[in-house]
Image (spheres, helix red, strand yellow):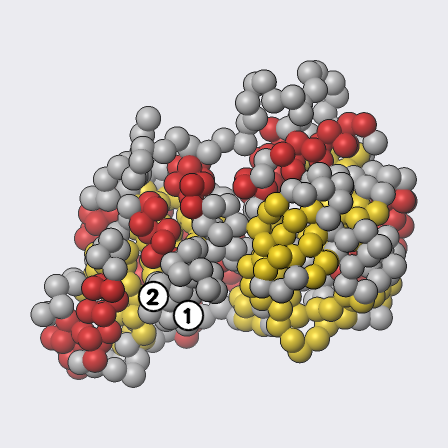
Amino acid sequence: MVTSVPRLVVAAPSSGSGKTTVATGLMAAFAARGLAVSPHKVGPDYIDPGYHALATGRTGRNLDAYLCGPELVAPLFLHGARGCDLAVVEGVMGLYDGAAGEGELASTAHVAKLLGAPVVLVVDASSQSRSVAALVHGFASWDPQVRIGGVILNKVGSDRHEALLREALDASGVPVLGVLRRAPQVDTPSRHLGLVPVAERRSAAVEAVAAMAAQVARGCDLDALEALARGAGALPGDPAPWTPAPAAHDPGLPAGGRAPVVAVAGGPAFSFSYAEHTELLAAAGAAVVVFDPLHDERLPEGTAGLVVGGGFPEVYAGELSANEPLRKEIAELALGGAPVAAECAGLLYLCRELDGRPMCGVLDAAARMTERLTLGYRDAVAVGDSVLAAAGTRMRGHEFHRTLVEPGAGAAPAWGLLAPARRVEGFVQQGVHASYLHTHWASEPGVARRFVERCRTS
């Protein structure tokens, strides 16, 4: 079993230091050298992996020790890195920032240790000179199990500034592997939940990734970075790659039978999804068909179940509302008892209205934009039986939205949230399971198998 995939983790002292620019640029620069690059992102973020996919031509995948558990981080990494020459993992927030109140859990440092991967620290040097040495020394010495293999200085203002920074770092023992000057052309636009997804700005995103690659190739020592990655060695514990295929003896899978069509919403309005979800659905026997609710007026032919994940329906509320034929067909499908799984954006789409515009009307609830950001990991338990989970099933999830659904829960809620505050949330009615909670099904593969089986029998 090959467990020695060359790998790097790109981290930073804090958010806004330039991790995404450097990580995406490295991925694209290594790919341009003819390497098959495996792209990964620490944490629950859906948007950065879209840029990673553009840079590498491979699916961007998340590594989240909270949602999936630490034991799945290395197996999921190996699953994504099959057949690759090198892997680049972009961190989240600051290097040592993890789930609130949980110590190092789900931090970039935690994932780096689980992968036995060297860390490249990206430092925003725009407002410092000699102090950079103290900062790098502090991060490199905080946890002896985290290996800082080098530093990339970002937003350097001039040759004189660079010389001062290099002089200060000479005694730190941490090599400078790159220096990037201020380059606004590689910036990517943001809005209320972060970067604008690739699906909404495809051509501009391609240009931005190309600019990141050019800047990184020009300013970084790619040979030294590749050598650092190749020195990572075997992953700790000799893990096996994760697979979506269930065990042959799994009693939840019927023998033979026609593959039920599971329609999965995609396109600019519903661009948030984990690749493992569709892989698990397919492994459970579904025929997965992606459709775009902005443009497709009909569900895929023979649809037996529907999955509507995350995204930005609030940005496209007018267009989604105007697609009345599809809204009506989705309502008929749901009212007929077909399995429907909706997360966050999907929840909004199933509501009666969103910001006053008619939506699918599956749920007797109204959704609207607010100024308040709801963000954080959640521990959850299924309140009752649904198409996704049996009552009592425990899962971990993540909330990230600036919208409000009223009421916040139906007569039969989807989840009881155990932390950080106890409350019920979401809706279960007939075959519908709708919730704000983003979950990662790799942590509980039975979710996908249960959903597909319901599609077969509903």
The local secondary structure at tag 2 comes to loop
Q: Residues within 10 Å of mark 1 (few under 14, many from 20)?
A: some
Which residue is depicted at the point 59% across and 60% down?
A: 419
**Picture quadrant where residue 81 is located:** top left
Left or right: residue 191 versus residue 331 is left
Q: Position of residue 8 (x, y in %)?
A: 30, 50
Residue at the limit of the structure toward the left, as seen here: 171
Q: Position of residue 135 (x, y in %)?
A: 24, 73
Left or right: residue 165 versus residue 87 is left
**In the rendered structure, are the residues bearing label 1 and label 2 in contact, judged by CB atoms less than 8 Å apart?**
yes
Q: Which residue is mark 2?
A: 12
Query: Quarter of the image containing the C terminus?
Result: top right
Query: Quarter of the image containing the N terminus?
Result: top left
**Residue type, mark 2 in image:** Ala
Residue 277: mark: none
Front-lying residue, 162 or 237: 237
Q: Position of residue 180 (x, y in %)?
A: 29, 69
Is residue 402 visible in this depiction of the protein? yes
State how far apart marks 1 and 2 are (Cα).
Answer: 7 Å
Q: Which residue is mark 1?
A: 15
Q: Residues within 10 Å of mark 2 (few under 14, many from 20)?
A: many
Which residue is depicted at the point 79% across and 48% down?
A: 428
